[in-house]
Amino acid sequence: MKALVLAGGYPQIALIKDLKKRGYTVLLADWGENPPARQYADKFYQESTLDIEAIETIARAENVDLLITVCTDQALHTVATLSERLNLPCYVSSQLGRDVTNKRYMKSVLQKANIPTAKHMLCKAGEKLPTDFVFPMVVKPVDANSSKGVVKVHSLTELQEAVVAAQKISRTDDAIIEEFVQGRELTIDAFVQNGKATLLCVSEIQKIPSETNFVICRTILPPILSAVVENKIKQVIQQIADAFSLKNCPLLVQLLNRDDDIYVVEFSARTGGGEKYKSIKAYTCVDIIGATVDVSLGIQPEIQPQRSEKKYLTEFLYCHEGTIDAYLGFEEAQKAGWVDNYELFKKSGDEIHNASSSSDRAAAVMFVADSYEQLMMNYQKTMALLQIRNIHGNDIMRHDITIH
């Protein structure tokens, strides 16, 4: 049996290992020359996971039995489209794969189902924009990964520039404008079985302070929530499952929480990216990667979350512009027991230009403790120790965006 995995990040390493345990020969496709998961695959193709024709050529030539991805958004559309075209198993149809990865269709269904979400309008290339906006507003491409092209704007001039930039990023030349809703940002991980949505965990996400961009710098699991908000979250994930006819799939929902109200920003039929699959397993004992493979193959996984009492924090590290040479203090912090785990996303010689999207992360550091107080003590000691040095021996790690 052969499986073709799309995208070669760290979560895909866990996916490849799972597939090999099931007896699959694993092929990997990724746009990068040497993605982290490449060394774990049996064969590698350097192709964009968004190039449906190129991926179809590989799938047909290799006569694959399964096309799959996890923890990544836009590649899910490719998987759904080609699985239907090639009569391969998949947990979503091609139309559903489109609807959950394109904000144009997603927002329309959310609105019709009366699911609370920010007011919005679609902007197609060449169309004239209205001038009666109440600023600030948020501009997004309708179909992009890693917060690319997502910008908060404060004037009509900024709006016009951001819309053009977002349309250039979009593969369909579409942008969406939303009202800016102030509130705490929460990420909801859930799993749908036979149409019933089960809440796995809620994380609070915090972003780099900016007047324009929305780049995640940390997640805290679990956040402190009122019973009212938690009940509303459970209701809204079921509303989403019903509105989009989700049957058996992972579910990731991003929402804003203000007082006791919640507003859905967007969602997808996938699990969270980065290190989220590890956090979910540690916090709930649910193997979200294995469960996603199960539903892809038509198998019903056991989803019975057993939530831990421990507190978790993941810090994403970014750098000022420069060329990375060395990471210092990471092993020492782990040996001291302050850090539970860490991942290095960039290697020596990689150039860092900015912190405009999650793909610019240099590393991630995971903390686990019995209390929020202990969590923050371990965090502060670690952040004071860590350095990411450039080729000139200077520390270019963005210490300014850590918690002080």
Image: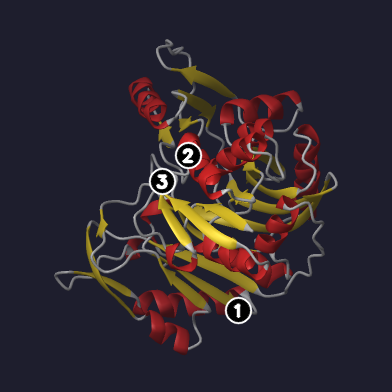
Please determine whether, in this image, residue 179 is positioned above or below residue 342: above
How far from the left and from the top, in percent, is residue 147? 46, 43
* Secondary element at image label 2: loop
Q: Label 2: how many residues lie within 10 Å, few (<14), some (14-19) or many (20+)?
A: some
Query: Closer to the N terminus: mark 1 or mark 3?
Result: 3
Q: Any mark on residue 361, and which?
A: none
Q: Any mark on residue 47, and which?
A: 3
* Secondary element at image label 1: strand
In the shown orientation, is residue 261 left or right of residue 393? Answer: right
Q: Which residue is mark 1?
A: 369
In the shown orientation, is residue 394 left or right of residue 246? Answer: left
* CA separation in Å, label 1 and label 2: 39 Å
Which quarter shows the N terminus? bottom right
* CA separation in Å, label 1 and label 3: 41 Å
Q: Which amino acid type is shown beneath numbered disc 1?
A: Ala
- Mark 1 near mark 3, Cβ–Cβ under 8 Å? no
How far from the left and from the top, in percent, is residue 301? 79, 60
Query: Closer to the N terminus: mark 1 or mark 2?
Result: 2
Residue at 81%, 36% in the rendered image = 242
Look at the image and tell me whether residue 265 can be seen.
no
* Secondary element at image label 3: loop
Closer to us: mark 2 or mark 3? 3
Which quarter shows the C terminus? bottom left
Q: Label 1: how many residues lie within 10 Å, few (<14), some (14-19) or many (20+)?
A: some
Q: Which amino acid type is shown beneath numbered disc 2?
A: Leu
How far from the left and from the top, in percent, is residue 273? 55, 55
* CA separation in Å, label 2 and label 3: 9 Å
Q: Which residue is mark 2?
A: 50
Q: Which of 17/137 is in front?
A: 17
- Mark 1 near mark 2, Cβ–Cβ under 8 Å? no
Residue at 82%, 64% in the rendered image = 304
The residue at the far bottom in this view is: 336
